[in-house]
Image (cartoon, rainbow, N blue to C red):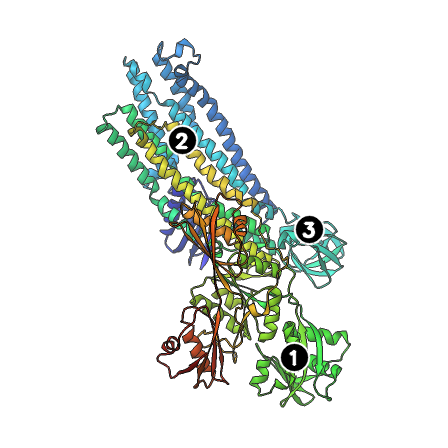
Amino acid sequence: MNTYTFKIDGMSCASCSGNVEDTAKKIPGVKKASVNLATEKLTITTEESGQEFIDQVCYAISQIGYSAKLMDNTITSEDKKEFINQRLEKLERQRKTLILAFIFTIPLLYISMGSMMGLPIPNAITPTNNPLAFALVQLCLAVPVMIIGRKLYKKGFKNLISLHPSMESLVAIGTSSAFIYSMYATIQIINGQEHYVHQLYFESTAVIIALISLGKYFENKAKNKTSQAIQSLMELAPDEATIIVDGETKVIKTEELQVGDTILVKAGEKMPVDGVLTKGHTSVDESMITGESMPVSKNIGDPIVSATINTTGVIEYQATKVGNDTTLAQIIHLIEDAQGSKAPIAKLADTVAHYFVPTVISLAFIAALAWYFIGQEPISFVLSIFIAVLIIACPCALGLATPTAIMVGTGQGAKHGILIKSGEALEIAHKIDTIIFDKTGTITQGKPVVTDILPLTKDYPEKELLQLAASIEQYSEHPLSKAILLKAQEQDIHLAAVTDFKVLPGNGVQGIYKNEKIIIGNERFMNQENITTANVTQQTTPLSNVGKTVIYIANEQTVIGVIAISDTIKQTSASAVLTLQAMGLNVVMVTGDQALTAKAIAQQAHITEVVSNVLPKDKARIVKQYQKEGRTVAMVGDGINDAPALTQADLGIAIGSGTDVAIESADFVLMNDDLQNVVTAIQLSSATIKNIKQNLFWAFAYNTIGIPIAMGLLYLFGGPLLNPMIGGLAMSFSSVSVVLNALRLRKFQPKTVALTNVHTEDNEIKVIAQQESELKDGTVTTTESTEHATPIMTQVLTIETIHCQNCANTITEHFSTLTSVENVAVDIENNEVTVTTSKALTKDDYQQALQDTNFVITNLKTSEETTMTQTLTIETIHCQNCANTITERFSTLANIENIAVNIENNEVTITTSKALTKDDYQNALKGTNFTVTEIN
């Protein structure tokens, strides 16, 4: 499949974009077509290729009154200038046209309305003394304005004839009707029917055109601000670069650089393309790409990213990515794709816009005919109704509601180092209720170091044990292997040759060292090789309890030593997790570590749900299991090892990707490894979707209220009649208001939870450990967990002023910020709010959360539900498959929080918020051979 992007000129409203999209879809070979009104782009997916197909698209678009030009993604200095100049030139042309239109419109409005308002007008052109001159002067002033706005008429009538009416069609029909009737009135005045002087609408024609031009000018001026993110990124790369050729320096344009060129960069200069440092040492400011404010130290062999700034010294580096392949070019391309994409929330607006203009024209005729035949109103009244309905209707606001917000939202994301790949991903992010983090390199630093070396036999004292481990691990690329090698290097240990080296993913490595088979890995690996670890539990448990990863070293008979490796959590991990939990998200950590180590890390990060002993290939199945429970899941990890899980998740977030921004498996790409950016991404999504909903509400509300008023609904009940000129003003500024509202997103700032006096108790953490590295049909088996000792409080608040769903949403949103709150349910009818919390809160606590609202809590009642533990005896538990089946069956029961199966003692320990009977459990096991013999 090939994807082409075309720049479309001439679109002004949602009907225009709909017409272009429909036309593109009818072109032979087109599989998918999407038009974005805000960016004025058409994106086509097709199996076709070549210039002939491109010409076919351009021709088809030109036949419906628009122009199409294929876009080139290459960023050159000329492109940057053209990008800015085109927008400035368009605005300048609009400004000059606008001034010219008002030069004629203002005197026309003065002459037509002056006598009614008591303003001085020369006697030669007053409607009473010289009605013909009064009419002819208005005609002479109106015609130039219509000529100035000729594009409206040309496009409007062309679209109408092709049966694709647009906003211009509404304006063209309305103002032409006013002008034609005014010409008829002028002819009647010439024939002596001077009373027709009160039925002239020349000023309506001119004022409507002038006001619509004014609205379009302000709209485009505001839209320019929505695309400033792209413009700012384009300006980051330098226009020129200094290269070294045969020892001499030469300045060339950045777009002329080739892979392999040696580039010289002085202090304070920008890096023109991506590359690898070959000479010198420096610190580089990468904040414009990653959002990280601290300069990054660079040594020989380190990567250089385009558009970053060399802060100290003179360096030389070799170009590895140029043109469209640079990190900056890929970022711009991703943002443009996202800004050009559509969010599912826009589908309703697109559907309405498709039928909008034909419906409005029909309503204008129906209203006019109804007033003429049923209301017996004069033709001037009927014409005013007809024009007002056509002019006030605004498909522009509908078409701009979604894309403008997405443009600003994705731009803000880039500003914070978050690359959002599509409008769909942006919408899904705010629906996430469960977020799964990989441990290594995501929650932790990803820089493990050896902390303990414990020899368990006299044959291998500490130094020899390290030599053995490093000799085998030297062939592995795993981060833990690198930590062992680094420790060996620090002690100047010579590595020995190893034969028959093998890597067993998720378990460890093995090889022949000095004619002896050596196995190095985790406890699971030892169990698979029938090597017991029970005899070293006393040494390993204290290590695991503080979050260290235990690496067992064994020969074919026994464990001969243990190495402990520590990977500390990132500075921002804990606050990010707490913020996500405060936002109501269920935070889960998955890791290949054994349960004790996993729990220790989780406690530091304040994570209360952990899946341990996980093989890399099983992460996707764990994501799927949570999805089966009805959850909307985000997966956060790296884009390579976690690719299957990122793809399986509803939202894949690749963290700390650096220069690799085009990760296929990720929906969001975070340029640095700060977990706070995950918080920022989800909060930005919520803010953007909220902004889109506001835009759509006002766009629909404007038309829903405005069109009936224009049809004379208020006049029917004794109210005023809408003047077509007022309708034109309202129509113009409805679209401007939508764009201005979208621009409010530029003030977006993420919110975080402070770490003051926060502590996660050991017994609050639930650990789900995978057995034998297997997930049976995606079922997660609990083998080690703790009960939630914290009681669950139910508090019922009375708030008298809950009137509607908006009130309920506001209360829910404010109470959800309280860290102990697990659930909020609002009963609008009874003015009650039921809050489930792990900690009793006071009336003042809740009132403080509502401090920015008008809601007052009048009453608070508290009841407490404490979880209980029930132990069942089931005599026929023989194996892990039995445990899996029992866990799966009991998980279907309501109120169950945790299940732990002890195969050796034939016992099942269940944590539940409600006491269940023996029969309840036996019914859950119906169809199996298990019998509950006892319950305590």
Comparing marks 2 and 3, which lies closer to the viewer?
Answer: 2
Q: Report the front residue among 466 and 515.
A: 466
The residue at 49%/41% (across/down) is 741
In the rendered image, which residue does mark 2 sit on?
728
Callout 3: SS: loop
For marks 1 and 3 on the same chain, the one whose residue lies earlier in the sequence: 3
Helix, strand or loop at label 1? It is helix
CB atoms at circles 1 and 3 under 8 Å apart? no
Q: Relative to the observer, which residue lies in front, 461 or 143?
A: 461
Task: Please rate how many residues cluster around mark 1, counting C-alpha atoms within 10 Å: few if below 14, some from 14 to 19, many from 20.
Answer: many
649 or 923: nearer the viewer: 923
Point out the frontmost of discs 1 and 2.
Answer: 1
Residue at the spot 46% in from the left edge and 40% down from the top edge: 738
Up/down of 151 relative to 575, above or below: above
Residue 23 seen:
no
Cα–Cα span, label 1 and label 3: 51 Å
Q: Residue at x 34, y 13 (%)?
A: 131
Is 49 or 93 nearer to us in this picture? 93
Residue receiving disc 1: 540
Q: Amino acid at mark 1?
A: Thr
Q: Identify residue for label 3.
A: 270
